Image (cartoon, helix red, strand yellow):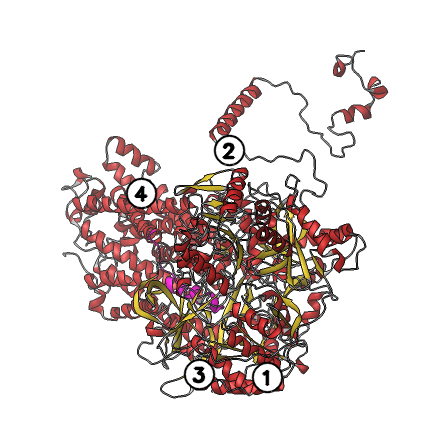
Amino acid sequence: MSAVVSPIRKPLITGNKTYHQITEDLISPTEKTPTKAWIIGFIIAVAVATYGIFCIIWTIWVGIGSWNLNRTINWSWDITNFVWWIGIGHAGTLISAILLLFRQKWRTGVNRAAEAMTIFAVICAGLFPIIHMGRVWLAFFIMPYPNTRGPLWPNFNSPLLWDVFAISTYFTVSLLFWYTGLVPDFATVRDRAKGLRRKIYNTLSFGWTGSAKHWQRWESLSLILAGIATPLVLSVHTIVSFDFATSVIPGWHTTIFPPYFVAGAIFSGFAMVLTLMIITRKLLKLEDYITIEHIESMNKVILLTGTIVGVAYLTELFISWYSGYVYEQFAFFNRALGPYWWSYFGMMFCNVVSPQFFWKKSWRRNVTLTFFLSIVVNIGMWFERFVIIATTLARDYIPSSWSLYSPSWVEIGIYVGTMGIFFTLYLIFVRVAPVVAVAEIKHILKTGGNQYVGENAKSHTHHTNEH
Amino acid sequence: MDNSNNKDNIWVGQMDLNHEEEFLHTLDQEFADDQVEYAAQAVSLSGNRRDFLKLLGFGLGAATVAAGCDIPVKKAIPYVIKPEEIVPGVANYYASSFVNGGDYCAVLVKTREGRPIKIEGNDLSSVTKGGTSARAQASVLSLYDTNRFTGPKMKDGASWVDTTWEEIDKKLRSALINASGVRIVTNTNMSPTAKKAMAEFTTKYPSAKIVTYDPVSSSALLDANEKNFGVRAIPSYHFDKAEVIVSFNADFLGTWISPVEYTKGYVKGRKIDDITKAKMSRHIQVENHMSLTGSNADNRILVRPSEQGVAIAHLYNEITGGSISTSGLNDRAKSLLSKVAGELKNASGKSIVISASNNVNEQLMINAINNALNNYGTTLDMSAPSYQRQGNDAELKALADDLKGGSVGCVIFCGANPVYDSAYGATIQEGLKKVKTKVSLAISNDDTTDLCDIVAPSTHFLESWGDVEAKKGQFSLIQPTISPLFDNRQAELSLLIWAGSEGLVENSEQPYYDYLKENWKNSFFNLQNEYATFQGFWDNTVHDGVFTFQSSGSSAYTSVSIDGNITKPSSSELEISYYETVHMGNGQYSGNPWLMEMADPVTRTVWGNYLTVPVNFDGIRTMVGYKNLKDGDLVELTIGSKKITLPVLQQFGQMPGTVSLALGYGRLIAGNTGSNVGVNVNDSLTSNASGIGYYNTNVSVSEKVGKEKDFSCVQYHHTIGVRGIDKETNTEVNADESALVTFDYFTGIKGFQGALTDRSVIYTSNVKDLKNNVEHLQERRKEAQHLNAQQIYKGFDHLYSLGHHWGMHVDLNACIGCGACTVACMAENNVPVVGKHEVAIHHEMTWLRIDRYYYGDVENPSTIYQPMMCQHCDNAPCENVCPVNATNHSSEGLNQMAYNRCIGTRYCANNCPFKVRRFNWLDYTKADLWPVNQPRLQEETIPFMADNLTRMVLNPDVTVRARGVIEKCSFCVQRIQEGKLSAKVEGRTLRDQDVRTACQTACPADAITFGDMNNKEGDLNSKLGSPLNYIALEEINVRPSVTYTMKVNNRDKSFDA
């Protein structure tokens, strides 16, 4: 590195890149023939997604009876997966919106992919509340619209209805935010493309010319959307937690749920971003853009949120004891020591113990460990939702109705299938759009007031033709 | 006339001619005095080109869509001539009697548009007094059984071929004349007219003998009574007058003789109306397995099946001073029975001792005990004896021997199935091969009928005429409520025709009706003096369904010598006892899907019999079953030379060293539902000189050999605070709370007191400790109400205080758990039957269930039954979570379901603290377009309920629910509506009696009271003042409309030590 390096602010992009190199590095994956790894990955993802879609059709065709739910446990894998995916979808907005407002420049390295991940995760999440309905063909009943049935409105008291609004708003805002960021990058792709491809990208970039006015409007819109999206980061999972918190079931009826769910969502979202980013930077050779610094920063967030979640778990235990209320006490007693003790144990270990490794700097910066723990965290977060949903329902007020549950092949198929859908979409995404926000990352090539020291600084003549 | 509107010069009246404004205005209206304004109506019908194209497009589109859909043709044919008594939409009730062998219940049959759809109790009956049993409730479904014979059949080779009645009559007349020995095999026959018909038959064919037996024998009891009283009958037991009840293995609340009648009396001594003068009968059950009756007992004394004889003998010695050897009786039982003897002596003349023993000497001892206690004439009444069991084991044995010897030329089975349900099944099956003419009068195929060569199918009791004398002088009539559905002929009529009866007018429209009426005119009319004319007497009896003649004279007890020929105690390590269940009988009811899917009150299992094995607390944290067996484990059971593989169930209260198994399962031929469900053990009953014994001592149980595929038990957790001895501390601890710990992270945690004991679901008390416990209950309720008062949400109390506010009261001291209400609920509300596999994964659809919990001593616990249905909470947690308002609250306090609105998120079911909401996981009602999701009960070709015959049982007032919607108890909202309408029509305010829910009317114990909480004079309010009352989970402020009472027992704790 020949650049002048600030002792306080480490450069966010390593490898002494020029602007042109950045463009080359980030746009070229959309132009080259897909690699073998991509093709194999895509085939697997599509196959898994197809199986998942088959299982969904099977569910609709046969009925919810093809799942192993029962009169006591009316939700299990379906809603567990829903909350899990929604949680995963949390990192995108957080990185885009809150980190933008907080001027965390390192976000530009990961925000594009994280936002894409959010959208795909929300798509997967949104599937479950729909297909878990006994009569999915009447799903439109939950939309508030004037109708000839009275008009008959949905029940505005129901947290499930709040979910509908929360998730659809979240999805819309995230999609807008993501697309807005993509517009200048699509223009860059267009500028390098020919023929039909050029036309398509021209349409996608809304005829972006890069004029100062365009940039100014684009900046304003980004800020406005960030402002709108920020409360959503907190609201979506708060509302999802209301599905449980507003009920009367001991173990669900808990006021701590909203902050605890939000922390958990950010926790799992960052873990998923890490999982994907570590693979992506390796495969697309983006180590200079998604650096160890990024990984470390995200690991810090994971450490923080994981610890918040841990405190929440312990608070729950304390409160259940302190409440002196037998059902509450029993609910948590059962979680830890009852028939599903292994899922509680798994949750505690994966979510509370495993992030504590990140107190050590060298471990935070260890890519292999980070990758491994990011998966452990997401397993743990899945357990958390399973513990909350299934084990709570399995042992509630009336002992005569207690029962147990294990998933059927259809439920497993749908869950695995959503991963197929997610990766199919993600793999398409890395082929058609730059995985790192080209326009935005160029802003941070220079940090800390240092001079631009790329090749062009010495001589403009060498590369002008290439632009 | 120049009028553009009247081009053809057609005018209507003066106003039209004058073009009056007012008239022209009304001309546009469809109806003359229509108040609605049609201002903006289309002025012109003449369309333009665009309209034409629009209409053309729509027409084409509509026609295409309509043509593309295969809309099934549903025929609804109106009455051409309306029958006088039928008003469409209004139910008619006819008095009749449910009879199946010795099972009897006076009933009212509810019919809609000519279809019987529901059975209710007949309040006028002096025997059953308006109560019903699960069996009676379910009997209406067997009318529409698709497995019924649709006409007479004859065997051609191995297969049945249809034939005509003429053919059968011809063939039989000639066969009977030539037959050397004729036997009519029947179960208990309570019909005087049928007996007359049989007498005519035996007169005509002198070689004919009638063989009567009962699927579960009471032969010894009858024989003993014959010796003591000269009458082969059963005394009337007045359980209501008894202060001490001792039952040796007799399940008198569930299956023994006349359970509905006995329940009515029994609960009178169990209900507590005034807690300051709380008094309860004492009920001691001597048995080895937890029977329905035993589970209601205050104390159980455990004796092995083979010890029953010496146990009775011990009590006999204690009370009468007899000296029959009692060696072999376990010491504990001995000392406890001595205590019981003391209690009995103190309650002389106010006690009942009964036994289900099938050993004559044991029954003679029971009679002697009752006589010594002066119970005859008070609690036991021989002046109105019961005829509900008439079977004679000796006759059955003689039949088996005769068949084996080949001396029988013709045998006629009148609904009896001895090949399956008797101890001589194998002998009879073998012997039947030697019989030339084998006739069955069964209504559907069974194990015995299948071996016959002629089927002359009888009619269902709902299609038949008949009479019943269940107890001496207490008659009831059977009247048809529908014409025979098939080409069948009533059994009695067949016998009369074959006998060539002179009293029978064969070509009359209803020959047996005429015969019956004639018999009543000649035999019974002159026994009464209430009615002057026979027609008046007859009409009233048919209307009421019952008639009681003043009986006279009672047989006196004469003592006879009792020898020591009683059951010999065995020294074998393990004994098995067989018992009859409430729902299956000994297989008579196994073809009925409602009964097959009714959970056994005690074991809570369905679709199969489970070997109940003893369970004990290991002193640390596990309830250990015999040989470490767990629920649903398969074992190999060896009884003598018989080996069967069957699943086990850990049963609390099962005596160590014994196992038990329900009878009535494992029929080879019992229609789609009953065939090959469970295992049959009738061939391993003990049969020796002293009779058939329902136990076996030559038995062993293997280790676990596998796991049952579908362990179908509707309740996995059975206890609510049983107490056992902790091994380490040697103190009494809450055993099942430590058993809840699956993994303790090596910390040694053993649960915490309160996890189950403090649940505000069940409250119990000993009658001696009632005052304290009621105080405690009141305190807890006060605390809960105080907490609930803290909420900000004000609710809708002001609304509920207006008009009606429906509520229910369930007296847990009356509820014996018999399950009649659960079947009644299925019948009334079109609740689907789902089959074994679906139940095994907890998809049962029952709106009303009876939770059964054990509490107290872990080895010999007390039991509580809690009917649990939708509590219709006024602050219902299910309602606010439904995203589409599909479940909501009525202004009368009902929690209602709008099935059409339900999208099936199941959030309501999750949020229901009582877990009473049921989801249609699959297409249980067979209403979907495609058959892929219609679960079959037993691999049948047409799924249950998919056949139009079966669907005739559906209650037209209750919606059949589609796949994917939630359903639950509606408090029988259709009955509420009917009650409101009838009150309105009669122009008076509604009384609580106008609306009686299906569970309430079915209950033989009068445990359920439904009514309007705002009606201060109503039945319900008279129950709501009791200090024993509580509301389940009161502190969570969902505010249920169902009130329970604290369960009070009269347990003597000194029995436990």
Gap in Å between the C-alphas at discs 2 and 4? 56 Å
Task: State the residue at coordinates (29%, 70%).
Answer: A353
Mark seen at residue A184:
4
The first of marks 3 and 1 along the sequence is 3
To which residue does mark 3 refer?
A: B329
**Which amino acid, mark 4?**
Pro
To which residue does mark 2 refer?
A: B71
Q: Is the residue at mark 3 from the same chain as the one at mark 2? A: yes
The residue carrying pointer 3 sits among few (fewer than 14), some (14 to 19) or many (20 or more) residues within 10 Å by Cα, namely many
Q: Is residue B892 above or below residue A131?
A: below
Gap in Å between the C-alphas at discs 1 and 2? 71 Å
Can residue A161 be found in the magenta stretch? no
Q: Secondary structure at mark 1?
A: helix
The residue carrying pointer 2 sits among few (fewer than 14), some (14 to 19) or many (20 or more) residues within 10 Å by Cα, namely few
Can residue A393 be found in the magenta stretch? yes
Which quarter of the image is occupied by the N terminus of chain B?
A: top right
Camera-side mark, 2 or 4: 2
Camera-side mark, 1 or 2: 1
Give the letter of the chain under mark 4. A
To which residue does mark 1 refer?
A: B344
User: In which quadrant of the rendered view does residue B487 lie?
Assistant: top right
Q: Secondary structure at mark 2?
A: loop
Between residue B52 and residue B561, name the one nearer to us: B561
Between residue A3 and residue B755, name the one nearer to us: B755
Gap in Å between the C-alphas at discs 3 and 2? 72 Å
